[in-house]
Structures are given as structure tokens and as C-alpha cells.
Amino acid sequence: MNRAQKTAWMNLITGFIWVIVMGLASYYLMKDPTSAVFRLLAIVSGIVFLFLLGFIAFVLSKKQSPVEPATDERDRLINRRAIQIAFVGLCILMFLATALPMWICGMDSSIPTVVLPLINMIVFLVTLTIYNAAVLILYGAKGGPA
């Protein structure tokens, strides 16, 4: 497994953890914005985030062998294609993130300001997931190292 695949797997795992954390945070935030549980969840999620960053940096910086190249031409092509796929996904998600609230709530209603950062975070996490899934799928389709 090369560095791009390790990065993709680690991002998918941490993205899944963040979806769970953001789901819990949004549940407690909607329930009671001044809740002590929400504050505790925010502190714990920050600590977990820093721990995961350190762990990911350690895992990804370690090479399998000293002669392993950082990237080759095939890696760059797969990365470019995955970025294109993620960009198309981002465009679709941004359209849905702006159009769905208008269609659901109507033109005369409003959205609480606390929801907007959650929408942006969800769009970011889904786009990151699309990119990492595209990297893994393209490596599998191209017959890359498993």
C-alpha cells in the first residue's frame, strides 16, 4: 500500500469519526446551545482531533522502504482524476446545500445561524470522503498496489 492509499484510508477513518462527532454536536446544540454536554463534547473533540493529527502524521511519514519514491506519474494522474471527481461532487453538494433549505423552508423563512457552519462542515467532510473514495477506487481500477 503506497502513501496515497494510506492517506486515503486514514482520511476515511477520521472522516467517519468526525461525522459521528459532528452528529452528536449538532444534536446537543439543537437540543440546548448552552448545554454542558455540548461544551464537553467540543473540548473532547478538539483533543481527539489533535491526537488523530499526530497519529496520522506519524503513520503517513513512515516509508515502507528507503527506495520508495514519494510519487510517480501514475500517482499524479490518479490524484488529478480524484480531484476532478471531488470537484464535481463539491459543485453538486454546494448546489444542494443552497437550494434544499430554500425549497424545504420556503422563501420567507430563515435558518438559524448555528446551522450554517454545520452545513459547511458536512459539505467539507462529504467532499473529502468523495476524494478519498475516488483515490481508493482509482487505485483498484488501475491495478495499483493493494
Image: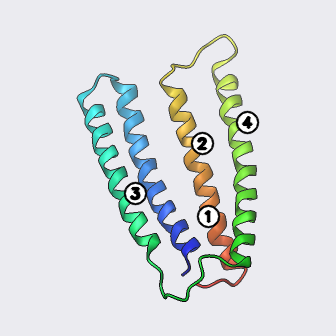
Residue 79 on image: x %, y %: 69, 66
> Dot 1: few (<14), some (14–19), or many (≥20) neighbours within 10 Å?
many
Residues at marks 1 and 3 touching, judged by CB atoms closer than 8 Å: no
* Residue on which the image places disc 1: 133
Disc number placed over residue 123 in the picture, else none: 2
User: Nearer the viewer's eye, disc 2 or disc 3?
Assistant: 3
Q: First in sequence, mark 1 or 2: give its number.
A: 2
Residue 66 on image: x %, y %: 49, 87
Q: First in sequence, mark 1 or 4: give its number.
A: 4
Q: Is residue 6 above or below residue 98?
A: below
Identify the residue shown where x is 47% and y is 85%: 64
Amino acid type of the residue tagged 1 in the rendering: Ala
Q: How many marks?
A: 4
Q: Secondary structure at mark 2?
A: helix
Q: Secondary structure at mark 4?
A: helix
Q: First in sequence, mark 4 or 3: give its number.
A: 3
Amino acid type of the residue tagged 2 in the rendering: Val
Q: Could you tell me which quadrant the N terminus lies in?
A: bottom right
Amino acid type of the residue tagged 4 in the rendering: Phe
User: Nearer the viewer's eye, disc 1 or disc 3?
Assistant: 3
Disc number placed over residue 112 in the picture, else none: none
Question: Mark 1 and mark 3: span between their CA atoms?
Answer: 20 Å
* Residue on which the image places disc 3: 53
Residues at marks 1 and 4 touching, judged by CB atoms closer than 8 Å: no
Residue 83 on image: x %, y %: 71, 58
Amino acid type of the residue tagged 3 in the rendering: Leu
Q: Secondary structure at mark 3?
A: helix
Identify the residue shown where x is 34% and y is 32%: 28
* Residue on which the image places disc 4: 95
